[in-house]
Image: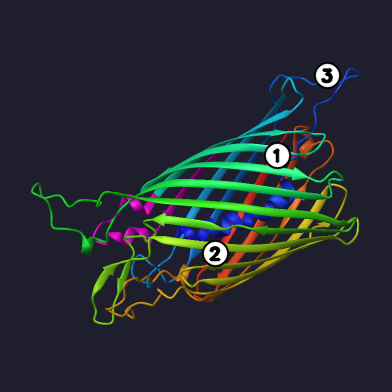
Amino acid sequence: MRKIYLHVLLLFLGVLSAHGQIKIKPAPADSSNYQSRKLKLDEINLVSAYYHQNGNNSAVTGGIGTEKLTDFANTIDLQMSNFNKAGKKNTFLFELGVDHYTSASSDKIDPSTISSASMADTRIYPSLNWTQSNEKTGNAFGFTGSFSREYDYQSLGAGFNLTRLSKDKNTQFDFKLQAFLDTWKVILPIELRPATSGNGREPRSEGSSPRNSFSTSFSISQVINPKLQALIIIEPAYQKGLLATKYQRDYFTDGSLRAETLPDKRYKLPIAARLNYFATDQVIIRTYYRYFMDNWGIRAHTAEIEVPVKLTSFISLSPFYRYNKQTGTRYFAPYGQHDTSATYFTSDYDLSTLNSDFYGAGIRLAPPHGVFGWQHLNMLELRYGHYSRSTGLVSNIITLNLKVK
């Protein structure tokens, strides 16, 4: 299912961000300390990813059947900046993402058709962030707006970010607040749809239902010494609304069939820590641990390590590995094993007890005179990752990241 893709891609882009974070540089100043108030283009980032997965536990068909899926994702972000009259820096980050996927399992919502609208879809998701920063103190705040739309849902998002640094700039506190207001189409499996209407046409959906998500993030990073840096993150979240995917089937011990049903409220509490150790001028060891819990009974431990190695002054290689162990929700049961008295039920293996491995490597080029001699193309990174989990799902992803300045 696409949820697995999004989870892995977010992780993959998170790894990428360790190398490709936006660096805010002050505009050149003359002897009178003048800073230009004209809006200028700082950099452009292009990320393209191809993802393919396969498995035999599709939630659409009750926990059995193909999970084959492909996704081609592309994002472009433009960073622009200027200075206001008070000398504060305004940074504008516009991002546009376009994903196109094909899903064999989604096509089983109505298996009698040769093809359906849900078999393939394109998701478009623009966002805009404005951040104002004081380059002397490092303090900053900003706001984000976003939109996303695909076949069965649309989402409006808003966010606020705040950064505070200590006087010696060895300690940094970050706070983020996000809200997403989503609207889902309630699409049922073909077997559970009402009888055809007077015109002989079967309704494609049962209308729409809201799902709202709210999350916060508190993080504090500390430079312990010249070789060691630490970061702690707490990210509580709350969701309310239609949290079940209604076109996913669930089969019961008596042979009956119902649409997936889950509570309409969910609380999540991820807690994470990261340590970066600069072993030598050529080798960095990055470690990460995350604990996740929610009120559905899911508990998960994630451990990750990445070791970037600088082969030359402008070429680096970054192997990485991530292990995840999850205890599933109390509402999960495999195909045909749900109790008929159950109030909530799912056969989505994303919510089951499982463990997974994700490993791969990336190569990064950042020559002083530009990639392939083009001065403005100052970074190219190519990464590959392989994901496998105990339920039998396997996937591969390859990502290309280009930075133009």
Circle 2 — which element? strand
Task: Give left or right: position of 393 versus 58.
Answer: right
Image spot of residue 203 (x, y percent): 20, 51
How many residues crowd mark 2 within 10 Å: few (<14), some (14–19), many (20+)?
Answer: many
**Residue picked out by circle 3:** 34
Q: Is there any visible trace of residue 310 in the rendered image?
A: no
Task: For marks 2 and 3, give the CA distance.
Answer: 52 Å
Could you tell which of marks 2 and 3 lies nearer the N-terminus?
3
Q: Which residues are magenta?
A: 96-120
Q: Is residue 229 magenta?
A: no
**Residue picked out by circle 2:** 395
Q: Is residue 394 above or below residue 78?
A: below
Q: Residue at x 80, y 50 (%)?
A: 171
* Amino acid type of the residue tagged 2 in the rendering: Ser
How many residues crowd mark 3 within 10 Å: few (<14), some (14–19), many (20+)?
Answer: few
Image spot of residue 239 (x, y percent): 45, 56
Task: For marks 3 and 1, give the CA distance.
Answer: 28 Å
Q: Residue at x 28, y 82 (%)?
A: 253
Could you tell which of marks 1 and 2 lies nearer the N-terminus?
2
**Residue picked out by circle 1:** 403
Q: How many marks?
A: 3
* Amino acid type of the residue tagged 3 in the rendering: Tyr
Q: Quadrant of the N terminus?
A: bottom left
* Amino acid type of the residue tagged 1 in the rendering: Lys
